[in-house]
Image (cartoon, grey):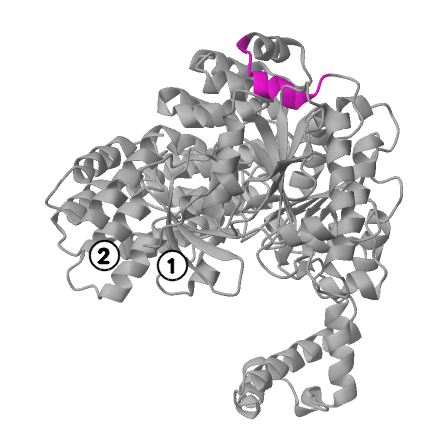
Amino acid sequence: MKTIRLFFSCLLLLSAFSAGAKEGFAIVIDPESYSAAKAEVDAYAAAIAKADGYKVQIVEDVWGVPDSIRAVLKGLHFSRRNPIVGAVFVGDIPVAMVRGAQHLASAFKMDEEKYPREQSSIPSDRFYDDFSLEFEFIGHDEGTPLYYYGLTADGAQTLSPDIFTGRIRPMDENGKVRIDALKAFLLKAADARLNPPVMDQMLFFSGHGYISESKTARLDEKRLWFEHFPLIDDGRNHISYIDYSDVVPVKPHLMNEIMRPELNVAMLHHHGAPDTEYLNAAERPYMVKDAKEYIMKNLRDHLYRARARGKDYKKLQADLKARFDVPDSWFKDAFDEDIHKADSLDDASLDLYIEDFAAYGYKPSAQLVILDACYNGSFQLNNCIADEYIFQEGGTVAVQANSVNSLQDKWHDRFFGIVAAGGCAGDLVRYAPYIESHLIGDPTFRFAYSGKNLDKLIQKDSKCVWKRLLRKGTPDQKALALEHLYRKGAVSTAKLLDICKTSPYAVVRLEAFYCLSRAKGDAFVEAICLAMDDADEFIRRIAVKYAGKSGDPRLIPGMVKMFLTNNATSRIVFDTSYSLLSFDKDALFAEFDKQIADVKMVNAEEDAAKLRQSFERSATRFLDDQAAITDPATSAKERRTNIRQIRSNLNYGNVPGLLEYLQSCTDAKVQVTLLEALGWHGHAWNAGEIASVAKAMSSDDALPEEVSREALKTFKRISE
């Protein structure tokens, strides 16, 4: 184990602006960047001090290791004088690559043993901003800013950042000169702080294949925006919407809208990669001639990929011809260079790439951009899509993005409205409980607001203030008040249930639901039942997902009703089909037979039989895979694969058998894997059984240390 020592004597605390301030803010910057851009850094610091009243402290990173920076930030936050409420990492600040913490991510589940650590670790600034977590140093990739840490059982197993943070990391990529890009951004950010725009014009976009392309989800999303931002509901056109299917390719259309000078916020829902925003699918054919061209191009694409991978593309051509019964002429000129080039250009037109910023002169105007996508915020790389947004000449100064893959069904706009009510961009990440979510750019950015700085209310954390906001605040302020009152134990489950039943605001009902999901118990089951019949599509969608996380038998009637509902949205149908697997199959079919008789359907008997057969096939395969975990005849590889699969879905009737196997197993590696997988099921109706076994194993001296440590993590994950 490498020991990293901290020399506090090397700490440079400079530029103490606004000496009478009560809160502080830290700019952590590498010495080279500070030396080259000192005037711009000081201007940025002065702008923050003037706009927010913070005492801004510039911390030069003279250590180059995350432990030292974290220790300094922790000391500054818990200082009695001018405690910092936020920090920004400027330049080449080391990146913590976190391992053993996938339960803190929304979707990331890569096998840490199978894949290289650079790929299977999560780049996360929760290392720097959540002081309740504890880490152990693993290693460093020489010549890179990547430092690897394992989340230990000693600290918390849930996220609750103490400060908000952001990243400003330009590199010499895509035509940029690193220091020039840094200087330009800092001056742009300083100007935005001193001359904040009014939040008035907003856009949301949905890309190909996202949340099953549910139209109802997007209809309800726009309605929620009027709850997030009640002051804009004045009859004017404040909110624009673009769907990927509006025009093919949609890329120029979307870029033009985001470059519109009046636009303030862009919420972009799509799939992503570090260098790509996936926007369109190939245009759907409507005429016979178009259909033929569509098929021919699809066949060529298969051959191109096979040849690029060194596969036998001639054999593939023969197989495709036989499989789809297509003539030889449809493969004609498949490798003609002109046709191949045209196909490549056509494919490139569908999505937005890093190179497009320079190629199209794309300079986004929206000050705040939210990339609700996988990997667009991979700030550990030399470049990513989120970086390109802020390092252009346009108006963008803050981007919320994800460093790894991200769940489509997560609450992407939680407390979104606080940015129009005194909250800063960094608050969006502070209250997004995911290890992969980050603010790229200036985390202190705020839109113009005449009321109190919301961060000062958060820092004061007064029960009286939160109770007043719960009564008289905007919907998002009410939701934020609920969150803080719940953390303080100052709101009962009965009150939360009443809010779920009576609040006219979906964002408030949703926050009450999330609070009850942490309280668990009978109130949570009742909340799920209420939410499955909520007016808002996202609340109904989250309800069926949490029903699957619970598996409580009392939820079976509601789940079967949802499964048989004719007007359920495409995404809810998708999520329900998975969640049903958590319940007892016989009880489900008994309820299915009971309800199907009362459902009015065309071809009712035939459709009911198809639904039942389809589900029975899925459930049988699902249960067989879980039964194989405890079967002595199962190979080690298959056992490990099946254990990893139960992290996403578990039939809770299998819990007793899995716990019995866990305790009798003599393979420490299997025990660790199974304990980690069971720890994902803290909402299960029988989670107490898992917690009890994990707690006992955590203090069993006869077990290997790695088993008892994982058992402690699992116990904490469930009990927290």
Residue 458 rendering spot, x and y as whole percentages: 59, 21
Cβ–Cβ below 8 Å for labels 1 and 2?
A: no
Q: In which quadrant of the rendered image does the C terminus lie? A: top left
Q: Nearer the viewer, residue 65 or 150?
A: 65
Residue 98 rendering spot, x and y as whole percentages: 44, 50
> Which residue bears the numbered disc 1?
112
Residue 427 rendering spot, x and y as whole percentages: 62, 32
Tag 1's secondary structure?
Answer: loop
Q: Which mark is residue 101?
A: none
Q: Earlier in the sequence, mark 1 or mark 2?
A: 1
The amino acid beneath tag 2 is: Lys
Q: Nearer the viewer, residue 59 or 377?
A: 59
Identify the residue shown where x is 38% and y is 37%.
157
Q: In this view, does 591 lie to the left or right of 495?
A: left
- Confirm whether residue 405 shows in the render: yes
- Confirm whether residue 248 shows in the render: no
Is 515 located above or below residue 43 in the figure? Answer: above
Q: Main secondary structure of the magenta part?
A: helix
How would you rate the neighbour count of disc 1 (Cα within 10 Å): few for under 14, some for 14-19, many for 20 or more? some
C-alpha gap between disc 1 and disc 2 = 13 Å
Identify the residue shown where x is 81% and y is 43%.
188
Q: Which of 564 and 647 is in front in this view?
A: 647
Q: Which mark is residue 669?
A: 2
Q: In which quadrant of the rendered image does the N terminus lie? A: bottom left
The amino acid beneath tag 1 is: Glu
Q: Give the range drawn in magenta.
A: 452-463
How would you rate the neighbour count of disc 2 (Cα within 10 Å): few for under 14, some for 14-19, many for 20 or more? some
